[in-house]
Image: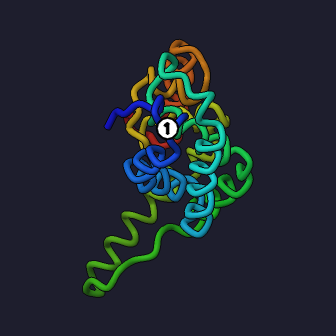
Amino acid sequence: MTMSLDGAVADPERFATVFDAHYEEIRRYIGRRLDLDIAEDLAAETFLSAFSHRDSFDAAKGGIRPWLYGIATNLIGKHRRAELRRYRALARSGPSTGDDGHEQRVVDRIAAGVTVQKLSAALAGLSRGERDVVLLVAYGELTYDEVAAALGVAYGTVASRLSRARNKLRDALGVEV
C-alpha cells in the first residue's frame, strides 16, 4: 500500500494510518530476524523513530515501506549480536514442532531441522550488508529499488550484495537460490 507522509508532517493523526497499514508487516520482519519477544518493542521503536523524524521523509528517495524497513533494519543493527546468536542457535538445535501425530512429527522435525540448521548457519556466515539485503528481499518482499532506498545505498550495491550472498548461500546449502 502506497501512501504519502506529506500530510502526516502537519497532521500527526494522519500518521496513525501509516502505523495501522504497516505495523504488523514491520513487526513480522523484525521477529523473523531477531526474536518475537524483542520484535514488539523494536517495531514500536521503529514507528516512534519514524514519527519523530517524519519531516525527514523524502518520497523522492522511495516509498513509506522502504523508509520503515530502513529504520527497522538500523534498529536491528543495534541488536546484531542477538541476530547472529539466534541464527547460530537455530543452526545447532532446529525448530520445535506442533501437535501432529508422532511419526509425522519425527519426519517433520528431521526435515525442518536440517533445513533450518543449514539455512541459519548460512545466514550467519553472510556479512551484515549481504544479510540485510537478502532478508529485506526475502522477508520484506522489497524490490531492489526499495532495498536501496531502505539501506541508503545504490541499486548496484544491492545487486552485487545479493549476488555475493546468493553465491555464498548456494555453496553453503548446496542448492540453487
Colour convention of the picture: rainbow
Indicate whether 38 appears above or below 144.
below
Q: Position of residue 156 (x, y in %)?
A: 53, 12
- Density class for disc 1 (Cα within 10 Å; few <14, some 14-19, many ≥20) is some
Q: Quadrant of the N terminus?
A: top left
Residue drawn 51% across the image and 52% down it: 118
Indicate whether 156 appears above or below 121.
above
Does the image show residue 24?
Answer: yes
Q: Position of residue 144 (x, y in %)?
A: 44, 23
* 127 or 94: nearer the viewer: 127
Q: Quadrant of the C terminus?
A: top left
Q: Is residue 126 left or right of residue 116?
A: right
Q: Amino acid at mark 1?
A: Ala
Residue drawn 45% across the image and 60% down it: 114
The residue where tag 1 is placed is: 8
Q: Position of residue 25 (x, y in %)?
A: 41, 51
Residue drawn 62% across the image and 62% down it: 41
Badge 1 marks a residue whose secondary structure is: helix
Does the image show residue 87?
Answer: no
Q: Is residue 114 left or right of residue 123?
A: left
Q: Is residue 82 left or right of residue 174?
A: right
